[in-house]
Amino acid sequence: MDDLRLMKRCIMLAKKAAGFTSPNPMVGAIILKGGKVISEAYHQRPGTLHAEALAIKKAKEELKGATLYVNLEPCCHKDKRTPPCTQEIIKSGISKVVVGMIDPNPKVSGKGIKELEDAGIEVISGVGEEDCRRLNENYVKYIRTGLPFVTLKVAMTLDGKIATPEGQSKWITCEKSRMFVHRIRSSVDAILTAIGTVKADNPQLTSRIKRGRDSIRIVIDPNLEMPLSARILDVPPQTFIVTKAFDSSMQNTELLKKKDKLIEKGIRFIEYRGNLDMKWLMYELGKMEITSLLLEGGSSLSAHALEDDIVDKVLFFIAPKIIGGRESFPAVGGKRFRRLEDAYVVKNIKVRRFADDILVEGYIHD
């Protein structure tokens, strides 16, 4: 069988656990012997067997002379909950390993391949490398920087509007587009929105797909305007409010009472002083092991994120509708560029279609 085809199968297997492996990467593994696949597996959750070890365990025949395909370099370090995959591979009798990409984790980063080669196992690396890197783009950025990979999602009309002058935005895009967004929500660690969106739409920001999961929700709410009846407060797993720091010496006792009531509801707070620096917020989220973040808000949040240079990837859904009017809400607010050469440039564009909607996907940072 073709190496690239089998690597793509590894990626498909790995995607079955999208949203469930963080802060670990998504990994799929296949064992080939005598020209046929005899075992395959994927890493399911932190603390469970890695894909390679699970594929070896599931194999029902002798593995001597077999080839292992895996989209990420096998781990070799011992300071974790599961044994090193390199040792499991060596003990199994597998004679060849085909690797999609080197693990950027400095605890591995080529050491796993060297250990296998030192044991006499042939290793081929870099097969389908770009696809493997895209699969784990959240993990790659987090390992290298300690910061979450940030995706900005926007749903807009043909004329670049996200809501009418009255704030109506349900629904700009079609059901197929919205279901795709639910899958994205299920795959990320957290979703970031702003209080304006909460007050206007009263969203839950949950994932309504079969076998999906709900992510942490984070609301930027500088002045603690959060309605106690907001639906976003009442769904698991957790909601955080990012707000200006204040203490009991403040005169506004109503705000203090509201904060106490929110704490009683299980809401946690991230507090800041002065103006909110989005890069600082990303650092704080990184410390919480949030490796991926989906931005779903209005034009102000989109502008703030772009201006503070935290956005890695964009998903712009374009519906075949025209709202018109200067008072309608634009996709991105904030400051404007006077020179075209200063505009944000989106690279590595992919275009997809959902019924009559168009999704433009690309990267600000690549």
Image: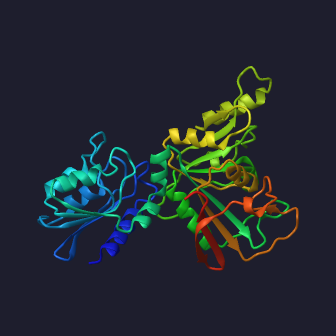
Give residue 229's position: percent from left, percent from top: 70, 45
Give residue 354's position: percent from left, percent from top: 60, 76
Tell which of 260 and 181 is nearer to you: 181
Based on the displayed image, in which of its 4 quarters is residue 349 positioned?
bottom right
Let me know if residue 171 appears in the view.
no
- In the shown orientation, is residue 78 left or right of residue 362? left
Give residue 211's position: percent from left, percent from top: 45, 61
Q: Residue at x 55, y 44 (%)?
A: 238
Q: Vertically, is 155 above or below 262?
A: below
Give the quarter of the figure containing the N terminus: bottom left
Tell which of 150 and 181 is nearer to you: 150
Q: Vertically, is 198 above or below 244?
A: below
Colour logic:
rainbow
Q: Residue at x 80, y 23 (%)?
A: 251
Tell which of 171 and 158 is nearer to you: 158
Q: Residue at x 88, y 61 (%)?
A: 327
Let me know if residue 147 appears in the view.
yes
Give the quarter of the figure containing the C terminus: bottom right
Based on the displayed image, in which of its 4 quarters is residue 7 positioned?
bottom left
Give residue 262's position: percent from left, percent from top: 65, 36
- In the shown orientation, is residue 343 left or right of residue 267? right
- In the shown orientation, is residue 125 left or right of residue 186? left
The number of discs equals 0
Quick one: which residue is furthest to the top in this view?
Answer: 249
- In the shown orientation, is residue 310 left or right of residue 257? left
